[in-house]
């Protein structure tokens, strides 16, 4: 498992990125993070949902409850226009950070 602080610092970027193409519910977001990271990153409900609520309070994502017959109610989150701007800025910051870390640690040509 990666250090908790690393995960905490990149959680917003991961969630906003996963919502870029379409609305998703919390469990799906959690499973995608776990799957795409090869199991290295995992979010439990206790940490994921408060983060989703904070992003919603900031206006970066918007949640909507949906009900399908035979299934329980789910809250689907989608990226808002301000959220797209934040995502672009966070991606640029992340790319700069990774490039600088690669240069410093000697992983640039690895």
Image (cartoon, helix red, strand yellow):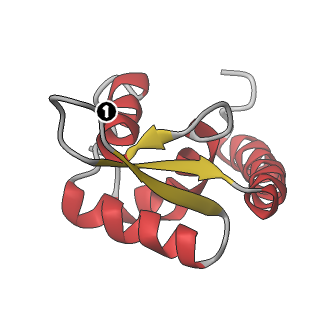
Image location (x, y in percent) of residue 105: 64, 45
Quadrant where the N terminus sits is top left
Q: Note whether 103 is above or below 37 in the view shown.
A: below
Identify the secondary structure beneath mark 1. Answer: helix
Query: What crowding class fits label 1: few (fewer than 14 Cα within 10 Å), some (14-19), or many (20 or more)?
Result: some
Q: Nearer the viewer, residue 98 or 25?
A: 25
Image location (x, y in percent) of residue 3: 34, 56
Spot the residue most to the front.
69
Q: Nearer the viewer, residue 53 or 30?
A: 53
Image location (x, y in percent) of residue 109: 74, 23
All told, the count of numbered labels is: 1
In which quadrant of the rendered view does residue 99 lie?
Answer: top right
Image location (x, y in percent) of residue 94: 72, 51
Quadrant where the C terminus sits is top right
**Residue at horizontal 15%, vertical 29%?**
70
Q: Note whether 59 is above or below 30 in the view shown.
A: below
**Residue at horizontal 18%, vertical 42%?**
72
Q: Please give left or right for residue 2 compared with residue 20 in the image.
A: left
**Residue at horizontal 28%, vertical 50%?**
43
In which quadrant of the rendered view does residue 95 lie?
Answer: top right
What residue is disc 1 on? 31
């Amino acid at each position: 498992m990666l250090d908790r602080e690393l995960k905490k610092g990149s959680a917003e970027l991961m969630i906003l990125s996963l919502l870029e193409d379409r609305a998703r519910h919390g469990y799906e977001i959690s499973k995608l993070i776990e799957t795409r990271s090869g199991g290295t990153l995992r979010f439990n409900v206790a940490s994921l949902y408060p983060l989703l609520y904070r992003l919603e309070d900031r206006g970066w994502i918007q949640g909507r409850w949906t009900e399908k017959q035979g299934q329980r109610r789910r809250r689907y989150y989608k990226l808002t226009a301000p959220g797209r701007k934040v995502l672009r800025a966070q991606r640029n910051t992340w790319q700069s950070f990774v490039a600088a870390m690669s240069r410093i640690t000697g992983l640039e040509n690895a």
